[in-house]
Amino acid sequence: MVGADPVCSTAPMRDGLLSESELARDLVRIGRSLAEDAGAPGDPVVLSGRADGLVVRVGGVVVKAHAPEADAGDLGTRLRLAASAPLRSVLLPPLALRPSSAAPPERPARSSGVEGDGAAEGALAGLALRVRGRLVTAWPAGEPVDPEDPDAAPWEEAARLLARLHATPLPAVAAAGRLPRAGAPYRVLRAMARLRTAARTPAAIAVEEAFASLPPPASGATAAPAGQPGARWRAEQTEALLHGDFHLGQVIRVADPPQAPQAPHSPHALAAGAGLAGASGAGGAPSLDPRAGPRAGGFRLIDVDDLGTGDPAWDLARPAAWLAAGLLPPEVWWRFLSAYRAAGGRAVPAEGDVWPALDAAARALAVQSAALAVASAGREARPLDEVEEALVDACRRMVRVDRPPDV
């Protein structure tokens, strides 16, 4: 069932008492301060307790502690992009933060590199804090996709958001700073690293073999060889701005935040810095408006940790992989693809066969999903569930199709 898979699932949510960790208490303190200032208080709830991304919600505010290895310079650029005028109707813009919201020691975030990196610190000022060694950001809370109601999943809306993101002229947002590479290919490598800490089961071997069969764009090379399916289509495309970790859990419905005065959206004006007032948190980053209901606005993409430049096919790869694994109904895929094409999406040709353009990334996302599933099952000492088995079976089929016949 579509609603049971990660394509449609939101971040795991659990009610109850928060962890007693100092970091969790600090996140609650930050969220409570922002929510109370906006007149939108509430009880704290853990949305994600993962070590690489602790997330709590307090009333109308969500506060996130990013992964310990998060680069301050790259995160700063990503936050500036989300707060910029051209993208605030596509990406959820961060909330402005002030050091007084955090527990001591209170200071703006610094680069993870040399102490006192002024450029990285300036990029993050007003948009992030460093709390107990972690970069922390705050966001307006929204209404997530309901995994128990797959028929209401906003596939068309998500497709249109991706198409608009992919159409963003890179010169128009270059004023946000050096654009980082999208995290999509590296997430595959991280999933494989996690798999290799688990037992070497038949399922793990199948995933390893599928990973070894991936074409160069998905296995770390920068370009496909000329004979690779999709190479000609890809060679005709320039890089795009992409989300880097798209699934429906990255789509929420929010109230429209108060808008800063918007500069012209021409590439020349934006390249000079117009429309990026959110860099300092004093104009581009929104405040909360508790009077607006969650349905007063529209849909936005959340979680900018992997936002960057690259092949836009990666943002369509997870739904494509789940289609190939038999986990996403063909009619749902067609709705998603048709809406993407109608909105001018550039990851695939406007008509005709899309698989030459999506094949490499879709295979990679099947491997990534299967690797994480097998690693999780091993860590929890349980058998694979039905969805996880389907992902591993997809990996086995990939290897069988690519393996030459015996002679």
Image (tube, grey):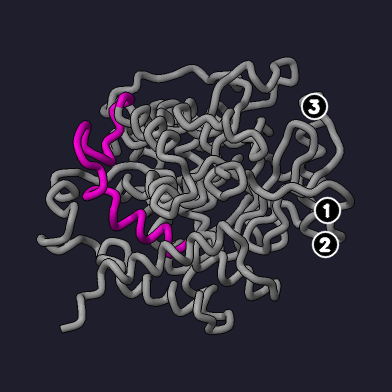
Q: Residue 16 at x, y = what percent?
A: 88, 49
Q: Residue 159 at x, y = what percent?
A: 41, 32
Sequence-earlier tag: 2 or 3: 2
- Distance of label 3 from label 1 (alpha carbons): 19 Å
**Residue at horizontal 20 percent and vertical 32 percent from the top:** 351
Question: Which residue in the structure is indicated by mark 3?
Answer: 40
Question: Which residue in the structure is indicated by mark 2?
Answer: 21
Q: Is residue 220 visible?
A: no
Quadrant of the snapshot with the C terminus: bottom left
The image quadrant that residue 319 belongs to is: top left
**Residue at horizontal 43 percent and vertical 75 percent from the top:** 206
Q: Amino acid at mark 1?
A: Arg
Q: Residues within 10 Å of mark 1 (few under 14, many from 20)?
A: some
The image quadrant that residue 266 belongs to is: top left
Magenta segment includes 113: no
Q: Residue 161 at x, y = what percent?
A: 43, 31
Quadrant of the snapshot with the N terminus: top right
- Distance of label 2 from label 3 (alpha carbons): 25 Å
Tell me if 300 is positioned left or right of 229 in this view.
right
Q: Amino acid at mark 2?
A: Ser
Q: Which residues are magenta?
A: 342-368
Magenta segment includes 350: yes
**Element on which disc 1 rests:** helix
Q: Residue 269 at x, y = what percent?
A: 31, 25
| Proximity of marks 1 and 2: CB atoms separated by less than 8 Å | yes
Tell me if 137 is positioned left or right of 332 in this view.
right
